[in-house]
Image: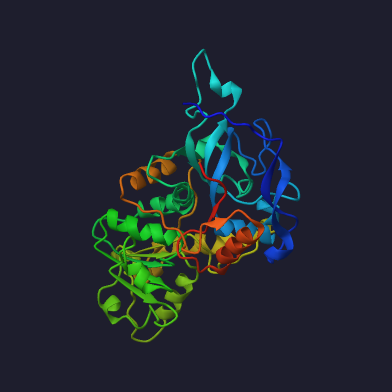
Amino acid sequence: MVQAFNIPPKIRAATCTNYGEDVDDVLSVQDNAVATPRIGDQPPAGFKNAMLIRVLAVALAPGDVRVMSGKTREFQGPPSFPYTPGGDVCGVVAAVPKEEEKKNGKKNCRFRVGDRIAARFVNKPMGMLGEYALVSTDVCDIVPDGISAEGAAALASSGTCAVKIAGRIQEGDRVLIFGAGGGVGSHLCQLVRLRGASYVAGVGRDPRRLMDKPLGCDLAIDYTQTDPFAAMKEWMDDPFDVIVDLSSGVWPALVAQKSVRGYKSIVKPASKGGRYLTTTPDKPSFKMRSAWDIVLFLIPPLWRALSSRCGMSRFSLPTYSYVLALPETPDVVTETLRLASEDKLVPCIDAQGPFPFTTDGVRDAFRLQASRHAKGKVIISVAKK
């Protein structure tokens, strides 16, 4: 049965009135806060091929906090204030473009009103934390039965990133994941095992959670109590094939340890197949306000990628790869949802949530995301199906 929607002219939404890091100053949720987005409107994130959904749940990510702070305003800032944050979402299709409904006498859109879909953000994370939102049909897919709206939002966000990273793992690899308990890490721990990793170790603040199902690490350590570079003799005796850095700062630590007399690395060098995969710069909080900032952002990973493959560093350090970009196609979303529907990937949501769609709830969710200590994804529940 096709679901009918009585779409209101204005909606309840979260809005940011200015840039800032104190959510109490800039972020609130109000009824009739903004006009309901319509197909044909220009989405604040600037994507194409938009359709309208009624929002069920939104997953926060580091980019949501970064955009609100204004540190990347020239490249990820909103067109104007106030703006509605949130980029990764699960919702129900409320309207599709008329030109998509029929083409040459046939339906051309792969979605129908009433479909429950999950979508990740495109260009910049904004526009989703309202009762209705525009999403890009290029980066979404239908959510299979059995997956909750909150779980689908988590999967569209960090699950897709984890799927792309896991694609670089080879059967038999020994894998060490820094930031294993976060949004991407909680899903990656599951996926590297699925890819055939022979041994998975995690670094985080809650080792017991990392070793329990569904994450299932063979060993986990609390980095606040144990130095993963120096205290784990067994890792030096049998070094890892792959280090995945989701927490920032691991590469400089590897380079510094290389100069310690008698030190044995915990990861194989590039010459022996060692790989280093990261999604973050050396510091988790960075500024990108100009073209020069972009240059400074790009130089370190480019140099590391080149020197670890062609220079003498390949005999002492693993190959460096910055893995972040997701394709602007639905493939990775489709694959992620398929794995979850087959019970091969469990959505991981921080136990403090899902947060309610109130001013206090949304502010608490953003505080948890900004702390960088979430255990899984930070989810805001906007509506029930």
Q: How is the image coloured?
A: rainbow
State the residue at coordinates (49%, 71%).
249
Report x, y in % for residue 92: 52, 37
Q: Quadrant of residue 254?
A: bottom left
> In the image shown, does 164 or 372 lie closer to the viewer?
372
Residue 324 lies left or right of residue 67; in this view the side is left
Residue 245 found in image quarter = bottom left
Q: In percent of the image, x 47 and y 46: which residue is there?
A: 149
- Camera-side residue: 95 or 335? 95
Relative to 1, does residue 186 appear above or below in the rendering? Answer: below
Task: Answer yes or no: is residue 117 visible.
Answer: yes
**Tally of marks:** 0
- Looking at the image, which residue sits at the far bottom? 261
Give the residue at x 72% y 44%.
32
**Residue 383, how many percent across, how many down?**
56, 46
Residue 7 locus on image (x, y percent): 64, 33
**100 displayed left or right of 226:** right
Residue at (38, 58) in percent of width and height: 188
Q: Is residue 58 above or below residue 176?
A: above
Outermost residue to the top = 105
Relative image position of residue 323 (x, y in whole percent): 46, 55
Does any portion of residue 321 appear in the rendered image? no
Q: Is residue 306 above or below residue 136?
A: below
Q: Nearer the viewer, residue 285 or 98?
A: 98
Q: Is residue 261 left or right of residue 37?
A: left
